[in-house]
Amino acid sequence: MNKKEKFNAMLKNFRKGENGGDPNAKLWFCGIENMAYGEPQKEHNLNLLNTQKYIKLSGQDLTGSFNKKIKYILESLGLIKSDISADDMYKSNSFYCTNLFPFAFYDVKDCDTKYLYELTGLNTRQEYEEACLSARANDKQWQEFKQNAKVIICFGKQNWPQFLEIFCTSESDKGKNELSLKPPKYNKVLITLNNGQTIILCSHPRYWKDWSNKETDKLIKEIKNLLAH
């Protein structure tokens, strides 16, 4: 297989690039991509491409805002213990955490075209993102993979349209809910789909002004109510 064929074959495994948890859980989280740099980044990305059973980035910790916020939400919902480590947290079957894009980069900008071409055979970040999204958006196997999720919390305001693209189950759902994204003042948007799933679009936890204790506790209350019905 050439680079592009190998990359496309990898995308058929929807667990590639996940943080962990159980996809059969009712509560899902979705980020943009794993964060790593240097050798851990390269090792992770090559394992995704070359190792059939390789699933997630190892050695995660609770110093970053993403893992820390997920732990706080899960702990407040009574789904994990307070003294759990990040790696053990992601072994839990009470939730699932995936990402829009499978490869690990230090941030969205840390993705030069030469390195991206070596991994995927694609020339630009835009081509890479479109390939990742199209592998799931209208795929029946993806629809089945995510069907047990009742509440899906998506982190990353700049990627809200892309979250809708993969989690909306119909074009009518997608078109109707794109209207919800237009007012820029919102930091959290709740979207109910025709299949009964609820998507909660949030700012990334790194933007602490959007995540006051009051707003976080309000979100946790909403999640609890949604999971109970």
Image: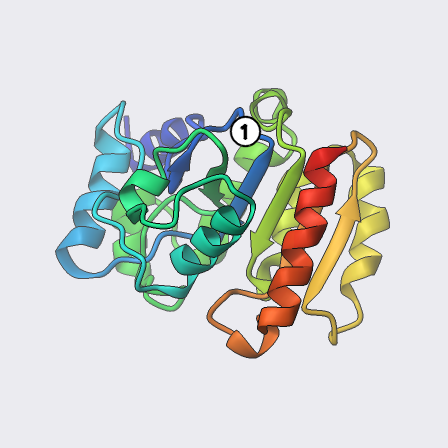
Residue 25 occupies quadrant: top right
* Label 1 crowd bin: few (<14), some (14–19), many (20+), radius 10 Å: some
User: Residue 83 in the image: x percent, y percent?
Assistant: 32, 49
Which secondary structure lies at badge 1?
A: loop
Residue drawn at the location 57% of the way across and 79% of the way down: 209
Q: From the viewer's perspective, is residue 124 above or below residue 7? A: below
User: Residue 161 in the image: x percent, y percent?
Assistant: 67, 55
Residue drawn at the location 33% of the way across and 44% of the way down: 121
Q: From the viewer's perspective, is residue 91 above or below residue 213? A: above
User: Residue 75 in the image: x percent, y percent?
Assistant: 47, 49
The one of 171 and 215 positioned closer to us in this rendering? 215
Q: Is residue 193 left or right of residue 79?
A: right
Residue drawn at the location 73% of the way across and 41% of the way down: 226
The one of 122 and 227 positioned closer to us in this rendering? 227
Residue drawn at the location 41% of the way across and 52% of the way down: 33
> On the image, numbered disc 1 is attached to which residue?
25
Residue 1 occupies quadrant: top left
User: Residue 13 in the image: x percent, y percent?
Assistant: 41, 26
Q: In which quarter of the image is the C terminus?
A: top right
Q: Can residue 124 be seen in this view?
A: no
Q: In this view, does 126 lie to the left or right of 154?
A: left
Residue that protrudes farthest toward the bottom in the picture:
209
Question: What is the three-letter code of the residue carrying label 1?
Answer: Ala
The one of 127 and 159 positioned closer to us in this rendering? 159
